[in-house]
Image (tube, rainbow, N blue to C red):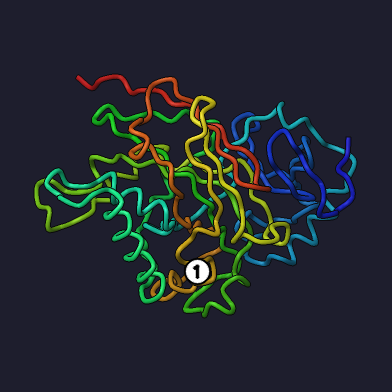
Amino acid sequence: MRGPEWRADVTTPSDGLRAPFALARFRDDDRVRLGIVVERSIRALDAQDIGDASLNELLEVAPASWERLAAAAERTEGWRDLDSVTLTAPVEPRQVLQTGANYRTHVIDLVVAGRAAEDPRPVEELREWAAEMMDRRAREGIPYFFIGLPAAVVGDDDELVLPEYSEQHDWELELAVVIGKPAFRVGPAEAMDHVAGYTIVNDITTRDLVFRQDMKEIGTDWYRAKNAPGFLPTGPFLVPAPFVEDPGALRLRLDLNGRTMQDATTDDLLFGLPALISAASRNMPLLPGDLLLTGSPAGNGIVHGRMLRDGDVMTATIEGLGTQVVRCRAEAAVA
Protein backbone atom coordinates (compact mmCIF):
# COMPACT_ATOMS: atom_id res chain seq x y z
CA MET A 1 0.00 0.00 0.00
CA ARG A 2 1.32 3.45 -0.81
CA GLY A 3 0.16 7.01 -0.98
CA PRO A 4 -0.91 8.72 -4.19
CA GLU A 5 1.00 11.42 -5.97
CA TRP A 6 1.35 14.71 -4.08
CA ARG A 7 -1.50 16.72 -5.50
CA ALA A 8 -4.11 19.06 -4.06
CA ASP A 9 -7.27 17.24 -5.15
CA VAL A 10 -7.02 14.09 -3.06
CA THR A 11 -10.31 13.63 -1.22
CA THR A 12 -11.44 11.19 1.43
CA PRO A 13 -15.23 11.50 1.48
CA SER A 14 -15.62 9.26 4.53
CA ASP A 15 -13.87 11.62 6.94
CA GLY A 16 -13.80 14.99 5.18
CA LEU A 17 -10.00 15.09 4.86
CA ARG A 18 -9.09 16.79 1.63
CA ALA A 19 -5.32 17.11 1.25
CA PRO A 20 -2.42 15.27 -0.38
CA PHE A 21 -1.35 14.31 3.13
CA ALA A 22 -1.82 15.27 6.77
CA LEU A 23 -0.09 14.56 10.04
CA ALA A 24 -1.48 12.51 12.90
CA ARG A 25 -0.23 11.03 16.14
CA PHE A 26 -1.19 7.47 17.05
CA ARG A 27 -0.71 4.99 19.85
CA ASP A 28 1.76 2.19 19.21
CA ASP A 29 1.92 -0.12 22.22
CA ASP A 30 3.12 2.06 25.11
CA ARG A 31 4.20 5.10 23.07
CA VAL A 32 2.74 7.74 20.80
CA ARG A 33 4.21 8.02 17.29
CA LEU A 34 4.01 10.69 14.62
CA GLY A 35 2.56 9.51 11.33
CA ILE A 36 1.70 10.73 7.87
CA VAL A 37 -1.84 10.16 6.57
CA VAL A 38 -2.73 9.69 2.90
CA GLU A 39 -6.32 8.89 2.08
CA ARG A 40 -7.28 6.08 4.52
CA SER A 41 -3.72 4.94 5.24
CA ILE A 42 -1.15 5.97 7.84
CA ARG A 43 2.57 5.30 8.12
CA ALA A 44 4.87 6.09 11.03
CA LEU A 45 7.47 8.74 10.24
CA ASP A 46 10.98 7.48 10.94
CA ALA A 47 14.52 8.88 10.86
CA GLN A 48 14.67 8.50 7.09
CA ASP A 49 11.71 10.86 6.84
CA ILE A 50 12.42 13.46 9.50
CA GLY A 51 15.80 12.72 11.06
CA ASP A 52 15.64 13.44 14.78
CA ALA A 53 13.11 16.24 14.43
CA SER A 54 10.18 16.41 16.81
CA LEU A 55 6.72 17.46 15.67
CA ASN A 56 7.20 21.04 16.85
CA GLU A 57 10.61 21.23 15.18
CA LEU A 58 8.97 20.17 11.91
CA LEU A 59 6.33 22.84 12.33
CA GLU A 60 8.92 25.51 13.02
CA VAL A 61 10.47 25.10 9.56
CA ALA A 62 7.19 24.78 7.65
CA PRO A 63 6.57 25.03 4.73
CA ALA A 64 10.01 23.53 3.97
CA SER A 65 9.07 20.51 6.09
CA TRP A 66 5.99 19.90 3.95
CA GLU A 67 8.17 19.55 0.87
CA ARG A 68 10.26 17.00 2.75
CA LEU A 69 7.21 15.05 3.85
CA ALA A 70 5.90 14.91 0.30
CA ALA A 71 8.66 12.37 -0.34
CA ALA A 72 7.57 10.42 2.75
CA ALA A 73 4.06 10.24 1.32
CA GLU A 74 5.48 8.48 -1.75
CA ARG A 75 7.27 5.69 0.11
CA THR A 76 5.70 2.32 -0.53
CA GLU A 77 6.45 0.41 2.67
CA GLY A 78 5.01 0.54 6.18
CA TRP A 79 1.47 1.72 5.46
CA ARG A 80 -1.43 0.63 7.69
CA ASP A 81 -5.15 1.06 7.37
CA LEU A 82 -6.12 4.18 9.30
CA ASP A 83 -8.89 2.30 11.08
CA SER A 84 -6.34 -0.16 12.49
CA VAL A 85 -4.65 2.43 14.72
CA THR A 86 -5.82 4.59 17.61
CA LEU A 87 -5.29 8.27 16.89
CA THR A 88 -4.64 10.83 19.59
CA ALA A 89 -4.25 14.62 19.52
CA PRO A 90 -2.15 15.62 16.46
CA VAL A 91 -0.40 18.49 18.28
CA GLU A 92 1.76 19.08 21.34
CA PRO A 93 1.17 22.75 22.17
CA ARG A 94 3.03 24.64 24.85
CA GLN A 95 0.42 27.40 24.77
CA VAL A 96 -3.27 27.43 23.92
CA LEU A 97 -4.86 30.79 23.14
CA GLN A 98 -8.62 30.95 22.85
CA THR A 99 -10.64 33.66 21.12
CA GLY A 100 -13.93 34.75 22.64
CA ALA A 101 -16.97 36.33 21.02
CA ASN A 102 -15.57 36.14 17.50
CA TYR A 103 -18.55 34.90 15.45
CA ARG A 104 -21.11 37.63 14.87
CA THR A 105 -24.22 35.42 14.87
CA HIS A 106 -22.97 33.36 17.83
CA VAL A 107 -22.61 36.43 20.05
CA ILE A 108 -26.01 37.78 19.06
CA ASP A 109 -27.58 34.42 19.97
CA LEU A 110 -25.78 34.37 23.33
CA VAL A 111 -27.00 37.88 24.14
CA VAL A 112 -30.59 36.81 23.48
CA ALA A 113 -30.18 33.52 25.38
CA GLY A 114 -28.78 35.40 28.38
CA ARG A 115 -31.52 38.01 28.38
CA ALA A 116 -32.39 39.14 31.89
CA ALA A 117 -35.94 38.40 33.01
CA GLU A 118 -36.55 42.05 33.73
CA ASP A 119 -35.30 43.25 30.32
CA PRO A 120 -38.33 44.92 28.68
CA ARG A 121 -36.97 44.84 25.11
CA PRO A 122 -38.58 42.53 22.54
CA VAL A 123 -36.28 39.79 21.23
CA GLU A 124 -35.91 41.41 17.80
CA GLU A 125 -34.91 44.72 19.39
CA LEU A 126 -32.37 42.92 21.54
CA ARG A 127 -30.95 41.18 18.46
CA GLU A 128 -30.65 44.47 16.62
CA TRP A 129 -28.86 46.03 19.59
CA ALA A 130 -26.43 43.09 19.79
CA ALA A 131 -25.82 43.22 16.02
CA GLU A 132 -24.96 46.92 16.18
CA MET A 133 -22.60 46.23 19.07
CA MET A 134 -20.82 43.48 17.12
CA ASP A 135 -20.50 45.60 13.98
CA ARG A 136 -19.03 48.44 16.01
CA ARG A 137 -16.61 46.04 17.68
CA ALA A 138 -15.48 44.70 14.29
CA ARG A 139 -14.79 48.26 13.12
CA GLU A 140 -13.22 49.69 16.25
CA GLY A 141 -12.36 46.91 18.68
CA ILE A 142 -9.67 44.30 19.16
CA PRO A 143 -9.85 40.50 19.57
CA TYR A 144 -10.60 39.05 22.98
CA PHE A 145 -8.24 36.29 24.13
CA PHE A 146 -7.94 34.03 27.14
CA ILE A 147 -5.67 31.12 28.01
CA GLY A 148 -6.43 27.41 27.84
CA LEU A 149 -4.40 24.67 29.47
CA PRO A 150 -2.39 22.39 27.16
CA ALA A 151 -3.19 19.56 29.59
CA ALA A 152 -6.83 19.76 28.46
CA VAL A 153 -5.84 18.89 24.86
CA VAL A 154 -6.76 15.29 24.04
CA GLY A 155 -7.50 13.21 20.99
CA ASP A 156 -10.90 11.93 20.09
CA ASP A 157 -9.66 8.53 21.27
CA ASP A 158 -10.51 9.71 24.79
CA GLU A 159 -14.05 9.85 26.10
CA LEU A 160 -15.23 13.25 27.27
CA VAL A 161 -15.97 12.82 30.95
CA LEU A 162 -18.65 15.30 31.99
CA PRO A 163 -17.76 16.52 35.51
CA GLU A 164 -20.42 15.78 38.09
CA TYR A 165 -20.38 19.29 39.55
CA SER A 166 -22.53 20.67 36.72
CA GLU A 167 -25.18 19.69 34.18
CA GLN A 168 -24.39 22.58 31.86
CA HIS A 169 -21.46 21.32 29.77
CA ASP A 170 -21.66 22.73 26.24
CA TRP A 171 -19.95 22.25 22.88
CA GLU A 172 -18.05 24.85 20.82
CA LEU A 173 -16.64 23.67 17.50
CA GLU A 174 -13.66 25.80 16.42
CA LEU A 175 -11.10 26.11 13.65
CA ALA A 176 -7.68 26.06 15.30
CA VAL A 177 -4.53 27.58 13.84
CA VAL A 178 -1.31 25.62 14.48
CA ILE A 179 1.67 27.97 14.74
CA GLY A 180 4.80 27.28 12.70
CA LYS A 181 7.74 29.64 13.01
CA PRO A 182 7.63 31.80 16.16
CA ALA A 183 5.50 34.92 15.94
CA PHE A 184 6.21 37.92 18.14
CA ARG A 185 4.69 41.32 17.41
CA VAL A 186 3.99 40.49 13.80
CA GLY A 187 1.69 42.60 11.65
CA PRO A 188 -1.42 41.28 9.92
CA ALA A 189 0.33 41.36 6.54
CA GLU A 190 2.95 38.82 7.67
CA ALA A 191 0.86 36.88 10.18
CA MET A 192 -0.10 34.02 7.87
CA ASP A 193 3.59 33.28 7.24
CA HIS A 194 3.63 31.92 10.80
CA VAL A 195 0.85 29.37 10.26
CA ALA A 196 2.01 25.77 9.86
CA GLY A 197 -1.42 24.22 9.56
CA TYR A 198 -4.92 23.78 10.91
CA THR A 199 -6.87 21.35 13.03
CA ILE A 200 -10.29 20.87 14.66
CA VAL A 201 -10.95 21.69 18.32
CA ASN A 202 -14.14 21.32 20.34
CA ASP A 203 -13.85 23.90 23.12
CA ILE A 204 -16.02 22.40 25.86
CA THR A 205 -17.53 24.96 28.24
CA THR A 206 -19.34 24.61 31.57
CA ARG A 207 -21.86 27.43 31.19
CA ASP A 208 -22.83 27.95 34.83
CA LEU A 209 -19.18 28.50 35.76
CA VAL A 210 -18.43 31.16 33.14
CA PHE A 211 -19.44 34.07 35.40
CA ARG A 212 -18.48 34.31 39.06
CA GLN A 213 -21.48 34.38 41.35
CA ASP A 214 -19.63 35.18 44.57
CA MET A 215 -18.23 38.46 43.18
CA LYS A 216 -19.83 39.40 39.89
CA GLU A 217 -17.51 42.38 39.51
CA ILE A 218 -14.66 39.96 38.75
CA GLY A 219 -16.40 38.86 35.57
CA THR A 220 -15.57 35.64 33.72
CA ASP A 221 -13.86 32.58 35.17
CA TRP A 222 -12.47 30.77 32.12
CA TYR A 223 -10.19 28.55 34.24
CA ARG A 224 -13.06 26.68 35.87
CA ALA A 225 -15.43 26.92 32.91
CA LYS A 226 -13.12 25.55 30.23
CA ASN A 227 -10.22 23.58 31.69
CA ALA A 228 -11.47 20.29 33.06
CA PRO A 229 -9.58 17.18 31.87
CA GLY A 230 -10.30 16.48 28.21
CA PHE A 231 -12.14 19.76 27.60
CA LEU A 232 -10.17 20.46 24.40
CA PRO A 233 -10.74 17.46 22.06
CA THR A 234 -8.37 18.13 19.17
CA GLY A 235 -7.80 16.61 15.74
CA PRO A 236 -7.72 13.96 14.49
CA PHE A 237 -5.46 15.51 11.80
CA LEU A 238 -3.05 18.39 11.40
CA VAL A 239 -3.50 19.63 7.84
CA PRO A 240 -0.62 21.68 6.36
CA ALA A 241 -1.52 25.29 5.60
CA PRO A 242 -0.72 25.08 1.85
CA PHE A 243 -3.54 22.56 1.45
CA VAL A 244 -6.20 24.89 2.89
CA GLU A 245 -6.93 27.33 0.12
CA ASP A 246 -9.04 29.84 2.07
CA PRO A 247 -9.33 29.39 5.86
CA GLY A 248 -11.67 32.39 5.87
CA ALA A 249 -14.32 30.47 3.94
CA LEU A 250 -14.50 27.02 5.55
CA ARG A 251 -17.71 25.27 6.53
CA LEU A 252 -17.98 23.99 10.10
CA ARG A 253 -20.65 21.55 11.26
CA LEU A 254 -21.29 19.78 14.55
CA ASP A 255 -23.88 17.03 14.90
CA LEU A 256 -25.12 15.78 18.26
CA ASN A 257 -26.43 12.22 18.03
CA GLY A 258 -27.03 12.76 14.32
CA ARG A 259 -28.82 16.11 14.70
CA THR A 260 -27.04 19.16 13.28
CA MET A 261 -26.49 21.80 15.97
CA GLN A 262 -23.81 24.03 14.46
CA ASP A 263 -23.56 24.75 10.73
CA ALA A 264 -21.68 27.87 9.69
CA THR A 265 -18.72 29.18 7.74
CA THR A 266 -15.65 31.07 8.88
CA ASP A 267 -16.69 34.11 6.85
CA ASP A 268 -18.83 35.03 9.90
CA LEU A 269 -15.67 35.75 11.94
CA LEU A 270 -15.53 39.27 13.36
CA PHE A 271 -11.73 39.23 13.26
CA GLY A 272 -10.06 37.13 10.57
CA LEU A 273 -6.99 34.97 11.02
CA PRO A 274 -4.36 37.63 10.17
CA ALA A 275 -5.85 40.02 12.73
CA LEU A 276 -6.06 37.29 15.38
CA ILE A 277 -2.49 36.08 14.96
CA SER A 278 -1.13 39.61 14.92
CA ALA A 279 -3.04 40.65 18.04
CA ALA A 280 -2.20 37.44 19.93
CA SER A 281 1.51 37.93 19.22
CA ARG A 282 1.65 41.44 20.65
CA ASN A 283 2.53 40.57 24.25
CA MET A 284 3.82 36.98 24.16
CA PRO A 285 5.66 35.06 21.42
CA LEU A 286 3.61 32.33 19.80
CA LEU A 287 5.69 29.16 19.61
CA PRO A 288 5.83 26.29 17.11
CA GLY A 289 2.96 23.90 17.75
CA ASP A 290 0.90 26.38 19.76
CA LEU A 291 -2.84 26.42 19.18
CA LEU A 292 -4.83 29.58 18.45
CA LEU A 293 -8.55 28.85 18.58
CA THR A 294 -10.53 31.25 16.44
CA GLY A 295 -13.92 31.16 18.15
CA SER A 296 -17.11 29.14 17.82
CA PRO A 297 -20.08 29.82 15.52
CA ALA A 298 -23.75 29.90 16.45
CA GLY A 299 -25.57 26.76 17.55
CA ASN A 300 -24.23 25.99 21.01
CA GLY A 301 -26.24 24.03 23.53
CA ILE A 302 -27.16 27.09 25.57
CA VAL A 303 -29.09 28.40 22.55
CA HIS A 304 -30.69 25.04 21.73
CA GLY A 305 -31.62 24.51 25.38
CA ARG A 306 -29.84 21.15 25.31
CA MET A 307 -26.60 20.49 27.18
CA LEU A 308 -24.33 17.45 26.95
CA ARG A 309 -25.46 14.23 28.60
CA ASP A 310 -24.16 10.76 29.31
CA GLY A 311 -23.95 8.74 26.09
CA ASP A 312 -23.99 11.70 23.71
CA VAL A 313 -21.86 11.50 20.55
CA MET A 314 -20.59 14.67 18.89
CA THR A 315 -19.45 14.47 15.28
CA ALA A 316 -17.64 17.60 14.15
CA THR A 317 -16.36 18.37 10.67
CA ILE A 318 -14.46 21.33 9.28
CA GLU A 319 -14.21 21.45 5.51
CA GLY A 320 -11.03 19.73 4.36
CA LEU A 321 -9.74 19.02 7.87
CA GLY A 322 -11.43 15.74 8.63
CA THR A 323 -14.04 14.58 11.13
CA GLN A 324 -13.77 14.42 14.91
CA VAL A 325 -15.94 12.07 16.97
CA VAL A 326 -16.27 12.66 20.72
CA ARG A 327 -18.20 10.34 23.01
CA CYS A 328 -19.51 11.65 26.33
CA ARG A 329 -19.70 9.88 29.66
CA ALA A 330 -21.11 11.30 32.88
CA GLU A 331 -18.71 11.27 35.79
CA ALA A 332 -19.79 9.21 38.74
CA ALA A 333 -20.98 11.30 41.66
CA VAL A 334 -18.22 12.19 44.09
CA ALA A 335 -19.01 11.04 47.61
Question: Which residue is rendered at x = 38% and y = 72% of the image?
Answer: 142
Residue identifier under label 1: 277
Question: Which residue is rendered at x = 75% and y = 55% of the image?
Answer: 50
> Is residue 109 in view from this perspective?
yes
Using the image as rendered, state which of residue 239 and residue 76 is in the foreground: 239
Question: Which residue is rendered at x = 29% and y = 33% of the image?
Answer: 168
Query: Relative to 215, does residue 287 appear above or below in the rendering?
Result: below
The answer to whether 113 appears left or right of 261 in the picture is: left
Element type at mark 1:
helix
Q: Dot 1, crowdedness within 10 Å: few (<14), some or many (≥20)?
A: many
Query: Relative to 224, does residue 164 appear above or below in the rendering?
Result: above
Q: Position of residue 304 (x, y in %)?
A: 37, 35
Question: Which residue is rendered at x = 27% and y = 48% of the image?
Answer: 123
Name of the residue lying farthest toward the left: 214
Q: Amino acid at mark 1?
A: Ile
Which part of the image, by quadrant, shows the C terminus? top left
Q: Quadrant of residue 235?
A: top right
The number of discs equals 1
The answer to whether 1 appears left or right of 331 in the picture is: right
Q: Position of residue 52 (x, y in %)?
A: 70, 56
Q: Quadrant of residue 98?
A: bottom left
The answer to whether 250 appears left or right of 77 in the picture is: left
Which part of the image, by quadrant, shows the N terminus? top right
Q: Position of residue 325 (x, y in %)?
A: 56, 32
Using the image as rendered, state which of residue 62 and residue 128 is in the foreground: 128
Using the image as rendered, state which of residue 212 and residue 152 is in the foreground: 212
> Is residue 97 in view from this perspective?
no
Q: Position of residue 102 (x, y in %)?
A: 42, 59
